[in-house]
Amino acid sequence: MVSSASVFSTAKWLEAQSLLFKAVAVLFGSLILTAGSYITVPMVPVPITMQTFAITVVGAVYGWRLGGFTVLFWLMQGALGLPVFAPGAVGGIARFFGPTGGYLFSFPICAMLTGWMVEHGFSGRSFVKGFLAMLAGNILCLIIGGAWLAVMMGFAKGMALGVTAFIAGAFTKSVLGAAVLLGISAGTSRKHN
C-alpha cells in the first residue's frame, strides 16, 4: 500500500518552490496539455481528445491552485492563437464561443476540482479514490460543456452530442488518470523510504 499523501506531497512540494521553478512547471504543464489535445478522434461538433485526461492529471499533481493556473495559462495561449488545441482547430478567442467553448471554460475548474479532491485525500491510498477524483473532473467538464451545447443546439441534441457520446471516454480517462496517480504515489513513496 502506498502513502495517501504522496501525490498531495508533490503538489505541496511544488507550492514551496521558487517562482522561476513554478513558471517552468506551468510551461511544462501547458506542453502536456497541448500534447493531450493532439491525441484525438475526430467527431462533430466536439472531437474526442486526451485533454481532460491531461487536465485532471495536471490538477491532481500540481494541486488546485497551480493546476488551475497552468490550465488558464494554456487557455490563454490558445486565445492568442497559438496551436495548443486539437489539430486543425482554429485558435484565437473565437474558439471560446463555438461548440467547444463550454468545455474550454470548464477546464480550469475541472483541474481545480480534481486538485482539491486530491489535496483532501482522494488519491494515493487507493485506486478507487484516485478514480473518483479524476471522474469528478471529467463529469464536471461534461456537465458544463454539455450545458453550453444545449444552449447552442437544444437540450436533446446538446446532451446527445456533448455528454452521452463522451461518458465511456470519461470513465476510461478516469481509470488511466487513477493509474497515473497510483504510479506517482508509489514512486514518491519509494523515493522517501
Image (tube, helix red, strand yellow):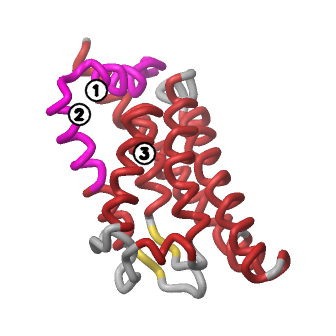
Q: What is the C-alpha distance between the residues marked 1 and 2?
A: 7 Å
Residue 65 screen position, x and y as percent: 43, 32
Q: Do tag 1 and tag 2 residues touch (Cβ < 8 Å)?
A: yes
Q: Amino acid at mark 3?
A: Val
Q: Quadrant of the C terminus?
A: top left
Between discs 3 and 1, the one toward the N terminus:
1
Magenta residues, start to end: 1-30
Q: Residues within 10 Å of mark 3 (few under 14, many from 20)?
A: many
Q: Amino acid at mark 1?
A: Leu
Closest to the observer, 117 or 24: 24
The residue that appears at 39% across and 42% down in the rendered structure is 69
> Is 13 included in the stretch rendered in magenta?
yes
Residue 112 screen position, x and y as percent: 52, 39
Q: Which residue is mark 1?
A: 14
The residue that appears at 52% across and 79% down in the rendered structure is 47
Q: Which residue is mark 3?
A: 57
Q: Which residue is mark 2?
A: 22
